[in-house]
Amino acid sequence: MWAMKNIGDTFLRKDINTRQIILGSFWRDEREQNVDGRFAVIHFLGDGRIEHPLYCFSIQANNRYLITRATVQRIHRGKRASSDICSWSGHIAECDLDVHAMKEFKISTTPNVEDAMLVTPEAPLREHRHDMVVCMAPMYIYTDWEILVTGIELWLAMGATKIVVPVQSASSATYRILQEYEKKGIVIIRHWPKWPIMSDTNPNGLVLSRGIEESHVNCLFFVKPWSDIVVFSDIDDFLLPLDPSTVSPGDNLQILKNLFAEHPQAGSLLFEHRDVQFIPPNRQEDQSLANFNFEFLRNSKNKMNCNVWRMKTRVVVNASRVDSVNMHETGIHRFGYVQTRVPCRQAHFYHLRHSHNTVPSPTPINMSPLADMLNKQWQNRIESFTSMKSEILNKTNTEYLEDFDRCMGAINDEHWTMKVSRCLTPHVCFSRLRRDVDCVAVASEYEFYRSGKGYFMNPTNIRVQKSEVNCESPVPPFTSGNHYFAP
């Protein structure tokens, strides 16, 4: 046997087939359909370098299966090529089902029902129609609760009525603040655990920017049934008028409605963002929600001017017109709608990053009217934080980001050599600083289903628990499966 193996090394090759980590499944809203029928979307993570066949099985009135092959698309196909650097990526598969499929159906990597796994799509949330919803980037090792509160309060003041925040790990104070907002019906917390390690690969280190695109697509399908305009943003990015001294409540919603009215074929709007001089809140004294305010915004005196070109970095969509969102642009449009680039001189996002003590090519701004508006709104809000408003909260620590910043910068520099050692994601970086912060993390376990020669993997037992060292989320183990081969 060993002699045959040694000979075989010259011509044997690995063939492991499709391995799909299920991120979510959703019913297609009837208002998005231009044909009759029942449709569902499977959102999964897979190797972007190979095809992922997927078949759908739904019971018909005669008790026989309707078998259809799903339309599978990589979420950024056409925008970005696949490579062996960030080789795993999100995909969406649309199933054409029997009209009687109301609760569940089956999927397989082959057209044989014996290989099929049962899927129960997420029931649409019962929400009234929202004019503007914000999908935030996922929270990882996040401790900056002051900027979190700033982001939530600013978007609420500017016209948003619901904010969706995916969480993988965060300081306990940050997570409890999110829970308070959730009780008030303002925020929806979505759990975003790490992905399991395969027999030969770790998807966590092979997906661009810790899966921000996959999270955005997941959020998009979650909010589609009850949202008109959806904004995709980092926690420290905000849309504001060009002259923030003229700010008034609801401005963002009006800006976006006017832009979509001006461009009726737009499925999405692509914005630049301007770096803003940022002096963080005073963190020398003990901080609580009761003594927190937005006075620090008055110290932001400059922003980068619009004469300096920057790529489009923030995306706003009409929810029914797109099916995927990439990191800095839209992916899949529906029904002939297109992405529209908004000139910086017309509207742009403001980026209040922790490291922006100064900005190049500055133009003066006056953020005092915004600080006044948010302070007034906060005084009304804080009264409802009865259980924790006077608690002393953790001091925000951004020093641990220095290693991540250096790591990301080094990977960026590698791109100019045309040879890149790793995917541009913090999961491939190591933070040398260990800090003692009370954090919680989303943990899960995974089950796998062998389908033909491929696999489906589903998260189970998703929960919030104390984090691992350095505020990290644990890597989920496989706890059950239907085959002796692990994925």
Image: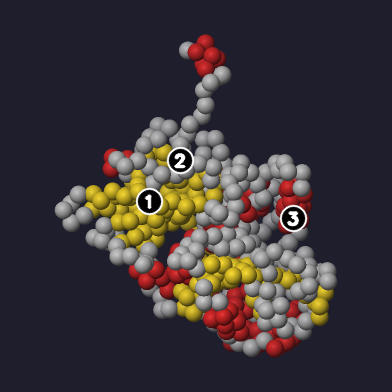
- Who comes first in sequence, dot 3 or dot 2? 2
Pick the residue in front: 188 or 25.
Answer: 25
- As helix, strand or loop, the secondary structure at mark 1 comes to loop
**Image x and y of residue 186, in percent:** 51, 76
Callout 3 touching callout 1 (CB < 8 Å): no
**Image x and y of residue 475, in percent:** 55, 46
- As helix, strand or loop, the secondary structure at mark 2 comes to loop
Pick out the residue farthest to the top: 3
**Image x and y of residue 116, in percent:** 32, 44
Residue holding disc 3: 405
- As helix, strand or loop, the secondary structure at mark 3 comes to helix
- Residue type highlighted by circle 3: Asp
Pick out the residue farthest to the left: 62
**Image x and y of residue 314, in percent:** 63, 67
Residue holding disc 2: 18
- Residue type highlighted by circle 1: Ala
- Who comes first in sequence, dot 1 or dot 2? 2
| Front of the two marks 3 and 1 | 1
Identify the residue shown where x is 33% and y is 65%.
Answer: 35
Left or right: residue 12 compared with residue 371: left
Q: CA distance from mark 3 to mark 1?
A: 40 Å
Q: Is residue 231 above or below residue 325?
A: below
Q: CA distance from mark 3 to mark 2?
A: 34 Å
Residue holding disc 1: 70
